[in-house]
Image (tube, rainbow, N blue to C red):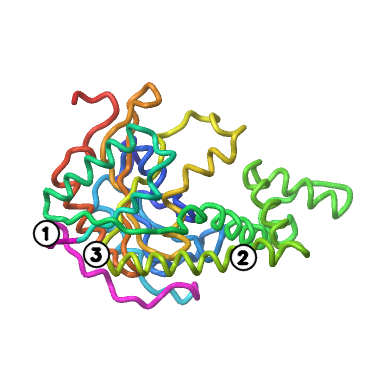
Amino acid sequence: MAAGFVPIALGSDTGGSIRQPAAFCGVTGLKPTYGRVSRHGLVAFASSLDQIGPFAHTVGDAAAALAVFGGRDGRDATSAAAPPIAWRPGTPLPAGTRVGVPRAELDAGIEPGVGDAFARALDVLARAGAVIVDIALPSARAALATYYLIATAEASSNLARFDGVRYGTRAPAGTLQEMYARTRTAGFGPEVRRRIMLGTFALSAGHHDEYYVKALKVRAVIEREFAEAFGKADVLAMPSSPVTAFLLGERIADPLGMYYADVFTVGANLAGLPAIGVPCGFSAASGRPLPVGLQLIGPPWGEAAILTAAETYERLTDWAARAPGDPA
């Protein structure tokens, strides 16, 4: 979509897989509230986290796409009968809109150019009438570990059905066990196999309570902290990713480094919150100018608030229309 071949594309966001690639490619990505969009037809990875949303060139286009495919679906028990989003393009940002920033959680690990672009984005929102307030998400540092325990455990369960018997491809083999092994090796890439193994371990006897159950308890704490933050702010702001796009294959040998790129996005999935990422500049920290994304997170069913803030920012800047290498 970033190449301009199509105006709208769909993605599935389990821990940031709409907002992060949108940031890397300089486009808009919207993850709705969990339950806003039916997941019927999606290959389930982590059922309590997955949500479908649009990629678009503008905030208005993303909202228009969501209006078409959002809503209750009898074929997905997790889809909610929520009222349509009451939002129109051009909605002015209410004066005094509180934009919460968890500064303590943003201190470490951000690429310098990303931090600079994010700071400038906050200045733009402040000039538009927003009030920037500090909020605390103390358990955010545990969100990444919590996410990877819950997501891999659910993936292990969900993907078990692709065994060559009931679903998907089947690799020829002489015995049933050999067929299982060959089918899953052929049908899943190395990263998916890694996550299935991690999830199977987390759910195994002797580790279920130690890892999976504990992660569910931390998830409840994270949800509560987000709810408390929305008592002080109308929307939350943070970068979509602490880094810009990495080279193809660059982090294959460093999966933990690759997972860390999700540090600012997984919280919205754990808490089921709506979030949008919009282009907010470029960073040349890697030696080449690459897009940076501004992420705005809203309370449950608060898509209208983040759409208004995101479109206001989009209207006051030209980052959505620019590409790396364009004249400043």
| Image spot of residue 199 (x, y percent) | 67, 56
Q: Main secondary structure of the magenta part?
A: loop
Q: Residue at x 52, y 52 (%)?
A: 144
* Three-letter code, disc 1: Pro
Q: Residues within 10 Å of mark 1 (few under 14, many from 20)?
A: few
Going from the N terminus, do you reach mark 2 or mark 1 first? 1
**How many numbered marks have been drawn onto this rendered protein structure?**
3
Q: Which mark is residue 304?
A: 3
Place residue 131 in its image quadrant: bottom left
Q: Residue at x 40, y 25 (%)?
A: 286
Residue 86 rendering spot, x and y as whole percentages: 21, 70
Position above or below: 74 against 203: below
Question: In terms of secondary structure, where does tag 2 sit?
Answer: helix
Q: Residue at x 69, y 59 (%)?
A: 202
Work out which residue is located at the far top of the displayed protein and give it: 287
Near mark 3 (Cα within 10 A), the count class, few <14, some 14-19 or many ≥20, is some
Number of residues whose C-alpha sits closer than 10 Å to that of mark 2, classed few (under 14), some (14–19) or many (20 or more): some
What is the CA distance from the residue labelled 3 to the residue labelled 1? 11 Å
Please identify the quadrant where the N terminus is shown: top left
Residue bearing the label numbered 1? 92
**Is 198 left or right of 4, judged from the image as shown?**
right
Q: State the mark number for residue 214.
A: 2
Span colored in magenta: 76-97
Q: Nearer the viewer, residue 313 or 116?
A: 116
| Amino acid on which the number 2 mark rests in the picture | Lys
Quarter of the picture containing the C terminus is top left
**Mark toward the start of the polypeptide (3 vs 1):** 1
In the rendered structure, does residue 62 fall within the stretch colored magenta?
Answer: no
Q: Amino acid at mark 3?
A: Ala
In this view, the residue in front, 140 or 165, is: 140
Cα–Cα span, label 3 and label 2: 34 Å
Q: Marks 3 and 1: CB-CB under 8 Å?
A: no
